[in-house]
Each structure stands twice: as C-alpha cells, then as structure tokens.
Image: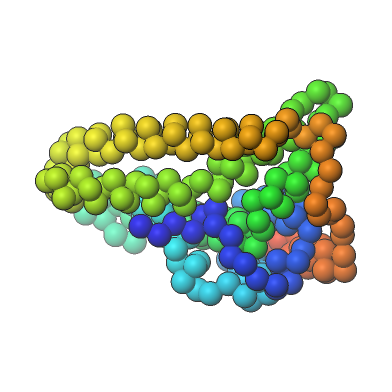
Amino acid sequence: MTVSIGQYLPGNSVIHRADPRTKLALTVVYMVLVLLTRSFIGFGLVFLYLAGALIAARIRPKYIWNSMKPVLLIIVFTLVLNLFFYQGETVLYHWRFITIYLESLIFCARMCLRIIFLVVGVSIVTYTTTPVMLTDGIEALLSPLKILHFPVHEVAMMMSIALRFIPTFAEETDRIMKAQTARGSDFDSKHIMERIRSFVPILIPLFISAWRRAEELANAMNARCYRGGEGRSRFRVLRMTKIDGIIFGVTAILAAGVILIRVWGV
C-alpha cells in the first residue's frame, strides 16, 4: 500500500523554495476558488494553475496517482450517488425506477473535478514542504491567536505530526493485513459483513502500534528537553522572496478569473 499524502519529496524547485506561509495561505485560497467554481471554463483555469504548479514543483505523475488512489472509492461513490439521485429536467436514460438526467452528469463531473483538484493541490504542499517548515508556517499564520492565549505552537506541532504519520500508519496497516492474510483472513470476500468482520483484527494491533509510537515520540521529545514554543529560537527564519511574490501574483490572476467567470455566469 503506497500512500503519498503526508510525504515530503526532497528537491530544489521553485515551489520547494517558496515560503511555507505562502504555500499554506494560498492553498486555502485555492481550495475556496475550487469550491466556488461552477463552469468548466473555470475548471480549465484551475487545471492550468494546477498543471503549472506541478511542473514548477517537478513532481512526477506517479506521485500524483499515489495521492489519488486513497480517494478513488470516494470519487466513485460520489459519482454513483449523484448520478442516480440528482434530479434534473433533461432525461438521458430511463429504465423502471432508474432515471439519469443530463444535469446529474454535469453535477457529477463538477463534484469529481473538485475532489481531484483539492486532493492534488493539498498534496503539492506536503510534497514540497518538510514537516518542520509546515509547523513553522502554521504557527506563523496562527500567531495572532496568541493574544487569546491559544496554544498556537502546540496545535501546529500536533497537526504536522499527524500529517507526518499518515504514511507510517498506512504501511503499518498494510503489514498487519498481510500477516492476517497469511493466517487465513479474507479481505476480498464478496460478502460485505464478512469483509467488515475481517477488518476487526486489524484495529487492535494498529491501535497498540499507534499508542507505542506516540509514547516513543513523547519520550524522545522529553529526552531532548522539549518544553513547547515559549522562548525557542529557530534554525531557519521564514522570509518572503521574489518567488512568493510571483506565486501570489499568479494566484491573484486565477482568483480574478474564477470570480469574473462566476459573476458573468459563463
């Protein structure tokens, strides 16, 4: 089982060198724009923006495919659910209680494109940003909340650790499944209830492994005298460069295009 979400791909591309605050802030803007987009012209603009980001980040297609594999089931489920239950006016196919409308096909296409663009966009950030830089970026963006005595550093640390351990637990799950298969478990059964029951023995060892890793991480942080973000210095100081200005400008052009298309109803 290969899971790329949460992994970092070392590199020296333009996106790798960008400030993590820029990448995180513009990722939020990008997600909002994807959700606002309704027309396929707008999706075309988003695709060009995303393709440019992938080329600039020098990410190979196999990593994008690895990012998409965990959500393929969600995409198929969303497609089937909306295809048969979304109501429209133009009937394309009707058989007994099954009716497929043209509007349902268009709606399904929009939903699938949104999911794909969101997953790939977020994956670019994790591919090109180390967990440490992600923590620093999240902490810097949430720093105004310190006025309200919000534990910004601790929350940023927990978020980056959780993201970092997604591939680790995916590999652990794969190892446990192979061990259970060798003992006679059938994870490919055609009966849904049998398949669900076969996954129960995975949960206990996976939970124990997660608990053990959390304890080991806590002991390692205590051994290094970790006491939170109060008074800590940084090995790398975050600074904006011309690269960040260019990325802001390109994203601003995308935002203007999507908003204009939405307003004009193209």
Q: 155 left or right of 188?
A: right
| 171 vs 260: above or below | above
Task: Residue at the far front: name it.
Answer: 223
What residue lies at 59% left-to-right and 42% top-to-bottom? 161
Disc tally is 0
Image side of residue 28 versus residue 140, left or right: left
Whole-percent x, y for residue 67 in the image = 48, 60
Give the percent coordinates (x, y) of residue 91.
36, 57
Image quadrant for the C terminus?
bottom right
Position of 233 relative to 48 (above/below): above
Question: Where is residue 181 shown, x and y percent of the image?
Answer: 18, 49
Q: In percent of the image, x 71 and y 61: which residue is there?
A: 258
Say which of 228 and 78 sits in front: 228
Name the residue at the left extreme.
Answer: 184
The correct choice, above or below, for 250 with respect to 215 in the image is below
Residue found at x 47% / y 52%: 167
Give the left or right position of residue 45, taking residue 253 as reference: left
Q: Is residue 120 visible in this depiction of the protein?
A: yes
Name of the residue lying farthest toward the top: 149
Q: Quadrant of residue 221?
A: top right
Task: Judge by depth and name the residue closer to the eye, 17 or 108.
Answer: 17
Instruction: Report if residue 33 is visible in the image.
Output: no
